[in-house]
Image: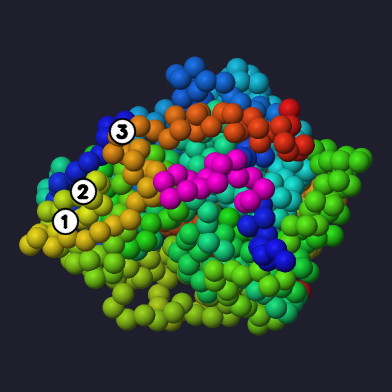
Amino acid sequence: MEPIRKIVSRTAVLPYTDIDTDQIIPARFLRTTTREGLGKQLFADWRYNADGSERSEFPLNQPQAAGCTVLVGGRNFGCGSSREHAPWALYDYGFRAVISTEIADIFRSNALKNGLLPIVVDDATHQWLLSNPGAEVTVDLESCTLGLPGGRSLQFAVEPFARVCLLNGVDQLGFLLKQDAAITAYEQSHWQVAR
Amino acid sequence: MSEAKTLFQKVWEQHQVVAETAETPAVLFIDLHLIHEVTTPQAFSELRERGLKLRRPDLTLATMDHSTPTRTEQVFGGQPITIESAAKQISALERNCAEFGVKLLGLQNSQRGIVHIIGPELGATQPGKTIVCGDSHTSTHGAFGALAFGIGTTEVGHVFATQCLLQRKARTMAINVSGRLRAGVSAKDLILAIINKIGVSGGTGYVLEYRGEAISALSMDERMTLCNMSIEAGARAGMIAPDETTFAYLKGRPLAPQGADWDRSVAQWRQLPSDPGAVFDAEVDLDANMLEPMITYGTHPGMSLPISGSVPVRADDAVYNKSLAYMGLKQGQPIGGHPINVVFVGSCTNGRLTDLQAAASVLKGRKIAAGVTMLVVPGSQGVKREAEALGLDRIFLDAGAEWRESGCSMCLGMNGDLVDAGKTSVSTSNRNFEGRQGVGARTLLASPLTAAASAVRGCVTDPRELF
């Protein structure tokens, strides 16, 4: 996994509330046994017409959204299904951070394990971001700050362990594997799960 | 005196291998890992690539449900599975389970079914356990007083390799429900009302505990319906304290403790309910007596109303209007009488025996309306056998409905059981998101009673009109 330290990008904006993971990637694309190449199916039912052509009115299909690595979504982003295909698809498409006022628990947990940084901001900042698509922002994970145009910046919270893993580009399994002795001791001391 | 604790706190503390610190989350031991074909192939690949073993195959149980066909000829008749990618996913699970020594209830196994139906049915789901699965409706198992939640595929890999997860402790929210549900009002209506009240993100960061007179009076099937949709309020888990109803359900089930272990387990389970005076981080109160059958009208499960109501009027709300346009509904329109095309009875929310009995009670001696397609999909092969022993399959077939093999089916259409674009379905499932049941499909979530009544009339119908 590539480390994340600083992300500088213009924002792409999807001004809809409660964007669920069925929209991020519809269920029919989950019949896969790999995690690669899902970016082309990102927001498939919003992005494409039935004949496969792009819907020009969809924000990500507009020229100014090309190359953006920061996505701003409406309140309660990533609700619904636990499918990790959602952050896989967002990452594969090119996104490295998602900003909203609320981000659903399972999606946030999945995103943090895949190099996609979920950022929760206050209502006023969110409103400004929703109203100013294409704004250049700077995400600094070391200082946990989101820099906005005009020199304004604000702090955001990231679970500390996930932050260290993202900064170093390491996954979380390595830490868990090192707990082997404690896990074995737990198994031996609980009759329900003793081997 | 020791501190008064909630049910959640007790289960959490009993499973902490390593307590959380400011720098690192808790290491939480997982008692039961349920797996299925859709969210595991990449996790098995990860094990293989890193040369890791699956630590506790004995605490892992596999089934297949999401991509599986429901047509009998494809399950048992030797006909090929129509969707090639689904067939591949099914065979990948078979290979993975064989290689890593995991017990698999395969396509033709008599105990197969939707993962959240078979865990309880087999007695693998028990009070006080930690239960995870790569599926958000794992919250269902909380009905037994288990801490059960959905995880992503990376976490599936974590549990494979270590039988543990890294977790931060959630906050707790008590949902206090007084009174009793009236006739014709079900657990599905109750959970839709709860989601409507707290909102689709109201439970984010919380574990819910459903409490009160109305909850104690529910059967296990009803409690599972309630806990199942906790995630639709944003809560990863919902729990109900185990009681005599819980113990009576579990006793004698194949994977439940037997003999002396049963007594020892029940004694431990009796210690689990929240202590008097335990403090929750938030509390919400509802009166069950006030509820009517509920139905959704929009594109998330919080957009619901009593079936006698009308689509709310909200001026100048672009997101709201987009949702109504998708659904083909207008502000101010009464929901009762709205024409429908498809009815789906099934899913991990409402695919248990009592759900099928409720639907059959309405359909008995009646026919579904001309032009309506109705699919009845039992939640497991066990539920299917029980329903057939009671003659429910005949009632559904005589009414003009289809009777299928078990699976997730039309809840999300991964197996090809889809609602066509522009068609309106009344569905006993859990999500009415855009495209959930098929591209352009319009989903109204409701109880099995309401679904069956709507099938009979061909439009949204209060089931109490047919009693």
Using the image, name the chain to which the residue with label 1 belongs: A
**B278 displayed left or right of A191:** left
Pointers 1 and 2 in contact (C-beta within 8 Å): yes
Span shown in magenta: B12-27
Q: Residue furthest front?
A: B1
Q: Which residue is mark 2?
A: A140
Q: Which residue is mark 1?
A: A147
Query: Residue A169: which numbered mark, if any?
Result: 3
Q: Residues within 10 Å of mark 2 (few under 14, many from 20)?
A: some
Q: Residue at x 60, y 45 (%)?
A: B16
Front one among A98 and B427: A98
Q: Where is residue B455, by image quadrant? A: bottom right
Residue B209 colored in magenta in the image: no
Label 2, secondary structure: give it: strand
> Residue B178 location, x and y as percent?
70, 78
* Amino acid carrying mark 3 in the image: Gly
Q: Where is residue A38, by image quadrant? A: top left
Mark 3 and mark 2: span between their CA atoms? Answer: 15 Å
**B253 displayed left or right of B274:** right
